[in-house]
């Protein structure tokens, strides 16, 4: 059985935020479970974690050009008038929790692959209805690699993230089904289109067009990650109750005493930061 490190990389080390605030345990893989649990370090102040997540939430919802327009509009007409018309952050509670958890999954995989340059789409920047969850893969990240013959190849990280105040078997079943061994990305063409739009990544998008997803999967270069962000009981609950038929899946449980408070505080902090865009 492949290990957690084989599939998504080692848990990052401090000063990375995930090592600063979470203790990591890689549980022994079985035929139906490859589980990495992250447990909140309760002796730390949450302010730095909230501030970090707030900045990442802004990064994932606003592209740099829009932030620059926000700064100019703030000077010209004031923030409230502009923000109401061009809001990218959700206000719906369920959407905030979903988006925030997806951001944490993407940033965690990126941190585990810190020595690589992963390409991603920042899909929330393109959501036409910010208070509704956006369809498509929660996480789709591409690593450009070389095969044994030195030819261009891809490694793909496909992920699904869920928030629950309290873990239950239903959400584990949902994650197991959505990340089963036959699952293929549904947002690959969207990612290619996004890469094509930026001259800096156009060549990458052109390269990605040459690959068939089934061939990537056959080579073992399609890796899966599921994240459940929930309360402090979550790691133990996952160990006892989760199973999946996908040997290329790492299931990440993140146990926090008050997960809803973290998400709400981070979105409020992000909103406060956007009210002073010149400080971003």
Image (tube, rainbow, N blue to C red):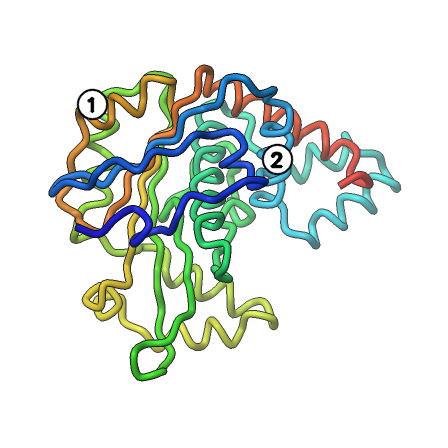
Write the residue at 51% across / 62% down. Answer: 117
In the image as oriented, which residue stretches furthest toward the right?
Answer: 76
Query: Residue 161 appears at what percent x and percent y?
Result: 36, 37
Q: Is there a contact, CB below 8 Å, between mark 2 and mark 1?
A: no
Taking depth in this image into account, of 24 and 241 the one nearest to the observer is 24
Residue 235 numbered tag: none
Say left or right for 22 vs 169. right
Query: Residue 38 appears at what percent x and percent y?
Result: 39, 31
Disc count in the image?
2
Write the residue at 48% across / 72% down. Answer: 204
Q: CA distance from mark 2 to mark 1?
A: 31 Å
Taking depth in this image into account, of 165 and 256 the one nearest to the observer is 256
Taking depth in this image into account, of 217 and 23 the one nearest to the observer is 23
Q: Is residue 277 above or below residue 95?
A: below
Query: Residue 166 appears at what percent x and percent y?
Result: 33, 16
| Secondary-structure class at tag 1 | helix
Q: Is residue 119 above or below residue 105?
A: below
Write the residue at 42% across / 76% down. Answer: 207
To which residue does mark 1 refer?
169
Say left or right for 172 vs 101. left
Write the residue at 52% across / 25% down. Answer: 263
Classify mark 2: residues with Cα within 10 Å, few (<14), some (14-19) or many (20+).
some
Say left or right for 244 vs 209. left
To which residue does mark 2 refer?
52
Query: Residue 251 appears at what percent x and percent y?
Result: 28, 38
Say left or right for 51 vs 204. right
| Of callouts 2 and 1, the N-terminal one | 2
| Secondary-structure class at tag 2 | helix
Q: Nearer the viewer, mark 2 or mark 1?
A: 2
Taking depth in this image into account, of 12 and 165 the one nearest to the observer is 12
User: Which quarter of the picture shows residue 74?
Assistant: top right
């Amino acid at each position: 059985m492949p290990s957690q490190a084989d599939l998504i990389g080692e848990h990052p080390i401090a000063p990375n935020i995930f090592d600063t605030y979470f203790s990591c345990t890689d549980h022994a893989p079985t035929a139906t479970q490859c589980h990495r649990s992250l447990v909140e370090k309760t002796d730390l102040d949450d302010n730095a974690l909230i501030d970090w997540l707030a900045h990442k939430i802004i990064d994932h919802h606003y592209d740099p050009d829009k932030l620059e327009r926000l700064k100019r509009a703030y000077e010209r007409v004031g923030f409230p008038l502009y923000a109401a018309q061009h809001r990218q952050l959700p206000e719906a509670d369920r959407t905030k929790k979903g988006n925030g958890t997806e951001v944490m999954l993407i940033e965690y995989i990126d941190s585990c692959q810190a020595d690589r340059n992963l390409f991603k789409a920042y899909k929330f920047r393109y959501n036409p209805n910010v208070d509704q969850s956006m369809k498509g893969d929660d996480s789709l990240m591409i690593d450009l690699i070389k095969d044994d013959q030195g030819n261009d190849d891809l490694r793909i990280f496909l992920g699904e993230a869920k928030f629950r105040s309290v873990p239950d078997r239903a959400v584990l079943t949902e994650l197991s089904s959505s990340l089963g061994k036959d699952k293929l990305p549904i947002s690959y063409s969207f990612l290619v289109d996004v890469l094509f739009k930026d001259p800096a990544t156009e060549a990458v998008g052109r390269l990605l067009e040459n690959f068939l997803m089934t061939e990537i999967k056959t080579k073992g270069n399609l890796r899966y990650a599921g994240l459940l962000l929930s309360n402090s009981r979550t790691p133990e609950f996952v160990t006892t109750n989760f199973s999946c038929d996908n040997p290329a899946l790492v299931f990440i449980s993140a146990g926090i005493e008050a997960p809803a408070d973290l998400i709400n505080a981070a979105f409020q902090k992000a909103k406060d930061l956007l009210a002073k865009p010149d400080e971003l």
